[in-house]
Image (cartoon, rainbow, N blue to C red):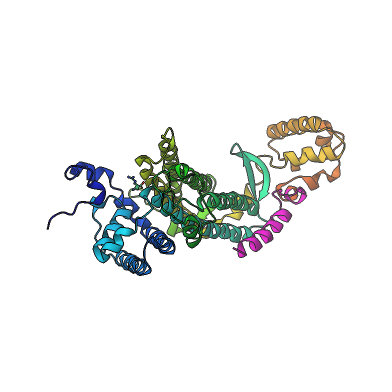
Amino acid sequence: MAKAKKSWEKRLAGEPDELTVDFVESLSYDTRLYKYDIVGSIAHAQMLAEQKLITKSEFKAIKDGLIEIGEEIVEGRFKFDKKYEDIHMAIEAALIARIGQPGGKLHTGRSRNDQVSTDVRLWMRDEIEILQGKITLLQKAFVKLASKHGENIMPGYTHLQRAQPIVIASYLLSFVEQFERDFIRLKNCRDLVNISPLGSGAVAGSTLPIDRKSTARQLGFADISYNSIDAVSDRDFCAEFIFDCAMIATHLSRLAEDWIIYSSAEFAFVRIADSFCTSSSMMPQKRNPDVLELVRAKTGSVYGSLMAMLTMLKSQPSGYNRDLQEDKIHIFAASDIVEASLDMARAVVSHTKFNTKTISAGLEEGFLDATALVEYLVGKGVAFRKAHGVVGSLVAYCEQQTKKLAELNLDEFEKYSSAIEKDVYESLGAANVVKKYITEGAAGPEQAKRQIAYWNKQLEQR
Ligand code: ARG
């Protein structure tokens, strides 16, 4: 069979070199856009019919043909040939092969430059929803675990040194807040994504009466873009999307790091279920938090995608450049990793137990109540700086005596400050301290209870 030359190769002499074919193709990774390419093309064809650029029956042939091609792809019957470069050309070529001449009218008033941007935006709209769904499931897992530990206390850390007592629920809810911001970031990103570039053509629009608002409406876009040159080259939204993925990965890596540390024998704060641990090929006693280590490591790949995307955009001359084809490699890689990591994190959170006994047993180490004692003195009229110094000296004294603050008697306290009275003991010890937190958002049981109720309601509505 004689090889049919692609229409855009009439300009070129002979077949492209095999090296070129392999180098320029994106079909190996943009196939996953096929659904969006097909719905985008159907909307475009319908608009062409509305504008009398094609007939109604041509539209019907195009639509039916595209739907059949979609079915073939879903069922794995479609033969992808990299000589067609990308999913757009592969589908268009298949359409022409199937329905003949009407298929050759589909690309009227359109370029792959506005087409690919449309496809990516449609894909991303869905992907944002998927990621938001996974974030919500993870948040729910945290809230569920938090509601088991509304009263249990653990040390709160700064610089990974014991700082002040907190309830475990507040610790867990701190992640719900982080992921909530990720959810909102994705929602904001969607606003920039949900704009139709279709009809911008290659760079300058078209001399044909293309109705851009019609295709935008059909595809559910909130608006159209208003500058064709910008529209074909804008990938800001891709960089932003990958940044959002990178921030999710960052938050996941922080959780991973905490629990890798917390599951060590030195801490023994948490026990991750066996089904989410791995063992060692050599050391039979091992229970390793490999999944969390991998969640932590994969963050690096997402950052890599972000850097690649930004670097790709840097210094591009105005208008479309083929560089932009590589956007898909990075948006797909980043979202695949983050999807998998969110799933894994949710599973781990749902199957981890806090060793409240072990944690409680160590709570009186590290002077977690020192700051509360300072505030006790402030309540007695002592200036904060003065009180801070008094308690600093008391802690040093305790260390010499190997005593806790709560073990000092009033005579000992008296030597450091006359403002300390019998009621001081109500402010000492981790359990007393958390109950005394009164600020909104503090890490005490009262605040945690309110926040759990808030999140339960909030996440329920999603
Ligand atoms: N596969 C290309 C991409 O992803 C489609 C656009 C190609 N346009 C062109 N004029 N060569 O960007």
Residue 30 drawn at (x, y percent): 34, 52
Residue 369 drawn at (x, y percent): 72, 42
Bounds of the magenta segment: 434-462
Residue 221 seen anywhere in this rendered image of the structure:
yes
Count of labels in the image = 0
Q: Is residue 60 above or below residue 364?
A: below
In the image, taking residue 139 as reference, residue 416 lies left or right, namely: right
Q: Is residue 456 magenta?
A: yes
Q: Is residue 447 magenta?
A: yes
Residue 7 drawn at (x, y percent): 25, 51
Residue at (85, 40) in percent of width and height = 379
Nearest the eye: 437 or 456: 456
The answer to which image quadrant residue 416 occupies is: top right
Residue 49 drawn at (x, y percent): 40, 64
Nearest the eye: 85 or 64: 64
Nearest the eye: 164 or 22: 22
State which quarter of the image contains the C terminus. Answer: bottom right
Q: Is residue 397 above or below residue 33?
A: above
State which quarter of the image contains the N terminus. Answer: bottom left
